[in-house]
Image: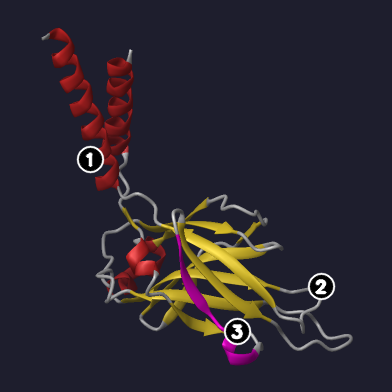
Amino acid sequence: MKVLSALIAGAMLLLATANAQASYITLSTADLLLAERVQTNTQASNWGDFQVVNFLPPGVLFTQNMSRTWSAGADPFYVYSYIGVDAEQAGKSDLTGVDSFELRLANVNNSPWELALFVQAAGQTHLSGYQTLLNHHTPVFEHFAFDLSSLGPDASDVEYLGLAVRSMLVEDPSNPDAYHVVVAPVPEPGTVLLLGVGCFSLAIYGKRRKNA
């Protein structure tokens, strides 16, 4: 029964990889630990004390205090932060022919935050659609993808890859609220393929031992 289960699992993984026509890239944990604050409009002191923490085992934790000036009758506006990894340093500055950039994001703060993927290419900022992620005490990951075809020829000149965080801070914008976002890589197709091959190999080995 175990051999059959391994064969089925391996077959499914190999089939999924073979059928995946799109190619994508992600950021490794090592890449994410090198992330920096690229742009922000927070008015908290010291630019919000941006921090990057290795949040083992699920991923990397980003946190920053966010606030804005409040005045009676003024229109609210988003307080945001763009967090990025130097694409050249990560070996991902030329993404010509790559379909998408993908990450898994989770909100472990005590309030909802809007999250998106962030790409800076040829000096221009690009964002995927924002999604509101509710807060959880333990990471509940959502899969985010950015369509790199929207960059056109600028896909060969990528400067930063990462995420964007924003909120209107409607409760009390002058009182800093820190986001806590956990980011994890998406397994790349090669990793899935190797896992499938491994399952097959173990299943075949087990079957041969059984028949010996």
Q: Residues within 10 Å of mark 2 (few under 14, many from 20)?
A: few
How many numbered markers are drawn? 3
Q: Which residues are magenta?
A: 45-55
Q: Is residue 40 left or right of residue 4?
A: right
Residue at 14% across / 8% down in the picture?
211
User: Identity of the amino acid at label 1?
Assistant: Leu
Q: Is residue 206 left or right of residue 68?
A: left
Alpha-carbon span between mark 1 and mark 2:
48 Å
Residue at 75% across / 89% down in the picture?
69
Q: Is residue 48 left or right of residue 103?
A: right
Mark 3 or 1 closer to N-term? 3
Looking at the picture, does residue 23 appear above or below residue 157? Answer: above
Residue where numbered disc 2 is placed: 171
Q: Tell me whether the residue at label 1 lies in contact with that at label 2, contact meaning CB atoms closer than 8 angstroms.
A: no
Residue at 53% across / 51% down in the picture?
141
Q: Tell me whether the residue at label 3 lies in contact with that at label 1, contact meaning CB atoms closer than 8 angstroms.
A: no
Q: Nearer the viewer, residue 85 or 75?
A: 85
Residue where numbered disc 3 is placed: 48
Q: Residue furthest right?
A: 72
Q: Residues within 10 Å of mark 1 (few under 14, many from 20)?
A: some
Alpha-carbon span between mark 3 and mark 1:
41 Å
Mark 2 or 3 closer to N-term? 3
Indicate the position of residue 48 as horizontal and vertical percent values.
60, 84
Alpha-carbon span between mark 2 and mark 3:
18 Å
Residue where numbered disc 1 is placed: 194
Q: Quick check: is 113 in the magenta stretch?
A: no
Mark 1 or 2 closer to N-term? 2
| Element on which disc 1 rests | helix
| Element on which disc 2 rests | loop
Indicate the position of residue 51 as horizontal and vertical percent values.
51, 77
Q: Residue furthest left?
A: 212
